Amino acid sequence: MNRTFSKLALWAFLALLVALFLGYFITRVLPDYLPAGRAVPPRLGDLVFYACAAATVAGAAGVAFSRNIVWSCIGLLIALLGTAALYVFLSADFLAVAQLLVYIGGVLVLILFAVMLTNRIGEVNVSNQSLGLGGGLAVFAAVAPLLMLVAVLVPWPVRPPGPMAPTTARIGDEFLSTWLLPFEVASVVLLATLVGAVVMARKELKAD
Amino acid sequence: MHLTLTHFLVVGALLFALGLVTVVTRRNAVGILMGVELILNGTNVNLAAFNHYVVGGVSGQVFALFVIVLAAAEAAVGLAIVLTIFQSFRSIDVRLADTMRE
Amino acid sequence: MEHAAHQAAHQLGPVLFERVSYLWLIPLFPLIGATINALFGLKLQRAYGKKVIHTVAVAAMVLSLLTALYAFQQMLGLPADHRFLQDTRWNLLTAGRVTVDLGFALDQLSMMMVLIITFIGTLIHVFSIGYMADEQPYWRFFAWLNLFVFSMLLLVMGDNFAMMFFGWEGVGLCSYLLIAYYYTDPEKAAAGMKAFVVNRFGDFGFLAGLLMLFWGMGGAWTARDDMRGGTYVPLPALNATAGATTAAQSVALAPVIDGVMVGPTLNFRELRDQIVIEKTGVKKHLQEQQLWGFTLLALIGVLLFVGAMGKSAQLPLYVWLPDAMAGPTPVSALIHAATMVTAGVYMVARLNFLFALSPTAMAWVALIGTLTAVFAASIGFFQYDIKKVLAYSTVSQLGFMFIGVGVGAYWAGVYHLLTHAFFKATLFLGSGSVILGCHHEQDMRKMGGLKKFMPTTHWTYLVACIAIAGFPVANGFYSKDEILWKAFTSEHLTLFGFHTPWLGAAIYLAGIVAATGTSFYMFRSYYMTFTGEYRGGQGHGDHGHDDHGAHAAPVAAAHATAGHGGHGHDDHGHAAPAHDDHGHGHAVPAHAAAHDDHGHGGHHGGGTPHESPRTITWVLATLAIGSVLTLFLGLPALWTHRPPALEHWLEPVLLAEVPFASKPHSWEWIFQGLGVLAGTVGWVFARWLYKDGKSTIPATLQKKYEGAWTVVYNKYYVDELYDATVIRPSVFLARFLSWFDGHVIDWLVNFAGWITRIFANIDGAIDKYLVDGAVNAVAAVTIESGRALRKVQTGRIQTYLYGALAGGLAVVLLNFLIR
């Protein structure tokens, strides 16, 4: 376990280095060697976006294809982190923070607990055997190109984005004015979830 | 090449597709739940992107927050169900939990 | 005078009537009495004795009589053209144009009938107290007698045909019940059945005539145009089938011409208005209709008269009436003399406006009446049973009544009805008194000399005999004479489409012969019963009312030796083939013992006849006085120069215009003289032959004309004729049909059953193998496909997801492709 984790950390570190190098290289070195006006030189922010996007997709791929459930968890962690970073690019700071808090701090921990409670972690092969990998790839091949094609081909009615600005206050206003009813309903849902989860978990404990 | 809406949509699409693959291929119930989280994340990316590039304001983010809330709730309930299934079948292999078939 | 009356009839408008609300009480009281006695009679009789029973019955009759008298008094207070009391209680039935109300109506005619029924009915109830005192089912008798009065009142008071028919059937039922009162005796029960069955033939005719009349009143019933013609154009609204469910709707449907509702109706008053008021065109419409080549009106008249034939015992349906003497004597007096049998006469008189339209129908009525009068009188000549004599006399007198209403002298027929009700009730009750006095002996050969034993009975019987024989001191003369005179002067009768003015004279001749015969047989019965020596022994301990067993001569001899008290058996040599004899083979001690059982309330001692109790004699006296007093109702115009009181009274009702030849007054005097002469001739012969039972001429004559005598004595073998022509073929037909049913029909049915069974088996096989097979195949296919499809349902979420994704993708792709 320890070894695995250190190996993962090492790989992540190396990946980060490579990404930084690539970013530097592409933004600072390469433009000088390119003929001027041929292409817009990528900016640092863009490169960071690409890195984050790559990490996100890589994490998601890890979730999808990892044979060990724990690796899947770690892939999910990476994907969630990357998504949070992407939110920052979209001027959604509160969303990013909420992603970190709720997903990584809550959901992921919960999932890890579930993994640990339900699996004999040691038996790696048994724990996360995939099922019909061919089918999965077929699904991927069918869905991903389609969605990407839509994303690229559709002429979205884009308007120039405003400047980056903190949104927390506005979100609070919106929650307590326009979206008050859904907000309250969401709280009721959370309460029901709380009660339901406790009831089910208690049952399990009692049965134990 | 500056960032455009399309970039984010592609990332969201990939997250969604990979989540879907996870859900479809996993035998482990927890794995399936993870896939669901991925799908929801892909959606959230789309919501935030459209909010930023098309709609303006914060309503897209509010939607994304609701999704996060519901995802958390779903995760809690789902994992409780997983625990119950494990309690019943001594396993969380979804292929075993097919007693409602007949 | 007649023509003047007819001219007046032309101008008659609708009947003006007075609404009252108590007429329903008149029939109600007897109904209550009947109900009480029928439901609780047995218990009351056991608990409180017979007194309660007859108190209830007589009280009901008296109340009814008082109510009728009140109505009479009210009617007298009204102007003559306004004397019509109408009491409509509620609507019983409405179907299209048929409306039947529970309505009672009293006009002058039905008023008279109601008074006769309630008055004579009350008297006969009182008479029955004494007469029926020995009978155990006392309550039954009075219950049925009251029920009869109720039905009879319904018959005469009902303001429509339906009510009348209800009463008509009701009296038939009561007649049956009362004739078969001694139902333990099979012969008497059979007599009841005979009356009922014979009446059924008549009722069939009545109903057919009624329906035909209703049909004829409707205009637009039939599509056959040749049924109508002339100027009378029937309105579509006459359609009797037009829908109406309430009386108000039905009335609204009726078209009104000149203030009179026209169209099919069951109501007498409406019918009369429609026909009498010529502007409505109904009369013309009816006259012009033909059916099966006959005039419709003639058919209606003849069919209605067939009903009257059955009820009023006319040829050839009279046969039930002599047999009906099996019932107790008060029943014979009330039902079979005074009231029920006159229902036919009443009906013809009630519908006089209808009969007057058809000379053919009237001629048939008169002709049948004449034949009956002569025929029945001749049978009466040689009967020995006193009640049988009276029965044939009744048939004969009913014939006279039909002569009256047949030739158009409606009031005379009705008047004869009234006088006959009085004197025939007197005669019957007198005979009842005699029978009672002679210990239920009915054979006149066993009577004789009763004059000194039963003075009151004797006098009343004599008065009634004088009345029926037609001497001017009592009522019979006036009605009979008027009938015969009108018959002689009638000249409008038509037979088979030929005008027959001679028919009136022929009827007169036959009638005068019948009148002579009437006088003869009535005085014969009087002399045989009341004069001479008492011929009955006293050994009649048994209650054999009609014990006409053919006893051998030695028995009679033994009986003669048993006589005492100086009244020996006067065997006057009747060696008749069917010698009516009694079981007097009793030894004296046995006879005495039996007599104690029999005891008429201690009214008699030993074997001698005795006068009847007071309830009986007073009734007899009342009726005899009535027989005399009612003559003042019919004093002829010839004597007083004004119309007879009853004719005047009935004139608004009996308004049919019938032409009579006008003859000089001297003729009328002569004919009255002839009538008296006829009575005298009959009386003289009867006195000569039968006074005191001394003459031997009857026996000699009888020996000489043995054959003819036998034929007449046996009532011309009419019953045997019926037996041979109707009953035997019926029975044979019934047997044949029974055989046919048992062998052919049953075989057919079984064959059909067999065929059916075979088909059923085939069908069953088809069902089992073909249909069931198909059904099972469907089921099997379903099961198998389900089993196959179940594999798709893996229970694995992923599999489903594949499906969902495939579907979603397909939708998206289709979206692209179609665009």
Image: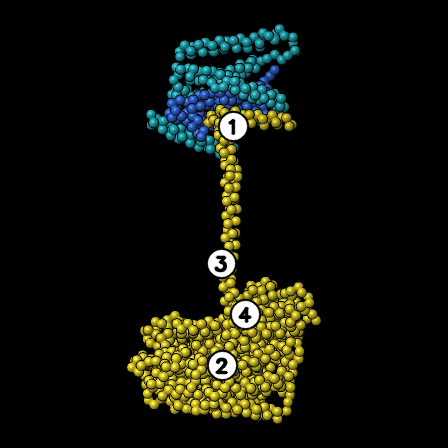
The residue that disc 1 covers is B63
Query: Which mark is drawn over residue C710?
Result: 2
Chain letter belonging to callout 4? C
Q: Are marks 1 and 4 on the same chain?
A: no
Answer few, some or many: residues within 10 Å of disc 2's Cα (few below 14, many 20 plus, some between 14 and 19).
Answer: some
In the rendered structure, the answer to whether residue B98 lies left or right of residue C370 reads left
The image shows residue C575 at horizontal and vertical percentages of 43, 83
Mark 4: few, some, or many residues within 10 Å (few <14, many ≥20)? Answer: some
The CA distance from mark 1 to mark 4 is 98 Å
| Residue reaching furthest to the right | C230
- From the image, tell me which residue sits under label 3: C742
Give the alpha-carbon distance from disc 3 to disc 2, as whole Å: 43 Å
Task: Give the cyan chain's letter.
Answer: A
What residue do we see at 52% from left, 54% from top? C748
Viewer-nearest of discs 3 and 2: 2
Q: Are the numbered discs 3 and 2 placed on the same chain, yes or no?
A: yes
Taking the view exactly as shown, the residue that stands out farthest to the top is A33
Pick the residue in front: C389 or C294: C389
Residue at the spot 52% in from the left edge and 44% down from the top edge: C763
Q: Secondary structure at mark 4?
A: helix
Up the image or down, C280 lies above or below C410; here it is above
User: x, y (%) of residue C179?
Assistant: 44, 75
- What secondary structure is found at the residue carrying circle 3? helix
